[in-house]
Image (spheres, rainbow, N blue to C red):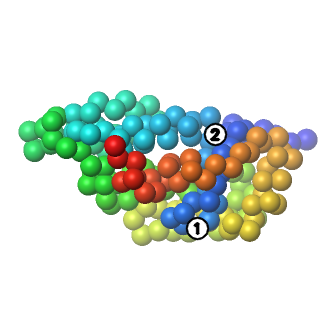
């Protein structure tokens, strides 16, 4: 008899370009998170950036990070690639860390390798050549698994500048 853990049963995964490995995310929130990233990246001014509603993520351009009186007025042009947290690689969080939350521990141990980064903590490196086997095992366990490289890379903040309006 298997016990069910309260983890995502719908997963989206793909080739994370920044780390050249597979990344997994909760499919139930991934699309909404991607929309938040896209909305912030397409903001034209600091005022628009500040007003982007975030449900899943924090807003790295929000009023608690950048004050209008510090030179970030509402009408000043906004460029997501110049936001401190984005420049430093803290926002959005590395998509490859999500596998630590959404994949069963035994599969993490079998297919992945824990990698420690200097600044951003640890992530699970899942080699691309494990895809077929790992996805098959997840499906056998009742997971719904979909591949979407574009979504995974958007969640990772890959090439954010190209999303600017």
In the displayed structure, does residue 51 sit left or right of residue 103?
left
Query: Which residue is depicted at the point 57% across and 50% down?
Result: 150
Quarter of image, res 11: top right
Sequence-earlier tag: 2 or 1? 1
In the displayed structure, does residue 164 sit left or right of residue 139?
left
**Is residue 70 visible in the rendered structure shown here?**
yes
Between residue 41 and residue 130, name the one nearer to us. 41
Q: Could you tell me residue 129's position as x and y percent?
A: 74, 68
In the displayed structure, does residue 156 sit left or right of residue 139?
left
Query: Which residue is depicted at the point 46% across and 57% down?
Result: 158
What count of labels does the image hold? 2
Q: Is residue 78 above or below residue 88?
A: above
- Quarter holding the C terminus is top left
Task: Single out the residue that lies furthest toward the front.
Answer: 165
- Secondary structure found at label 2: helix
Q: Could you tell me residue 29's position as x and y percent?
A: 57, 36
Q: Residues within 10 Å of mark 2 (few under 14, many from 20)?
A: some
Q: Is residue 20 above or below residue 86?
A: below
Q: Residues within 10 Å of mark 1 (few under 14, many from 20)?
A: few
- Secondary structure found at label 1: loop
Query: Which residue is depicted at the point 42% across and 69% down?
Result: 118
Query: Which residue is depicted at the point 31% across and 49% down?
Result: 80
Quarter of image, res 15: bottom right
Q: Could you tell me residue 71's position as x and y percent?
A: 10, 44
Residue named by callout 1:
20
**Is residue 102 visible in the rendered structure shown here?**
no
Q: Are marks 2 and 1 in contact (CB under 8 Å)?
A: no
- Quarter holding the N terminus is top right
Q: CA distance from mark 2 to mark 1?
A: 21 Å
Name the mark on residue 27: 2
């Amino acid at each position: 008899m298997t016990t069910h853990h309260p983890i995502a049963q719908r997963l989206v995964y793909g080739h994370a370009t920044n780390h050249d490995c597979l990344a997994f995310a909760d499919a139930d929130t991934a699309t909404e998170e991607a929309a938040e990233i896209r909305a912030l990246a397409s903001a034209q001014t600091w005022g628009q950036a500040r007003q982007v509603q975030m449900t899943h993520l924090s807003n790295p351009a929000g009023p608690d990070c950048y004050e209008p009186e510090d030179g970030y007025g509402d009408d000043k042009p906004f460029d997501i690639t110049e936001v401190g947290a984005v420049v430093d690689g803290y926002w959005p969080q590395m998509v490859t860390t999500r596998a630590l939350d959404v994949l069963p521990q035994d599969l993490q141990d079998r297919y992945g390798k824990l990698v420690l980064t200097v600044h951003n903590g640890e992530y699970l490196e899942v080699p691309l050549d494990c895809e077929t086997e790992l996805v098959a095992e997840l499906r056998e366990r009742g997971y719904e698994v979909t591949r979407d490289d574009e979504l995974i890379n958007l969640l990772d903040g890959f090439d954010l500048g190209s999303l600017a309006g």
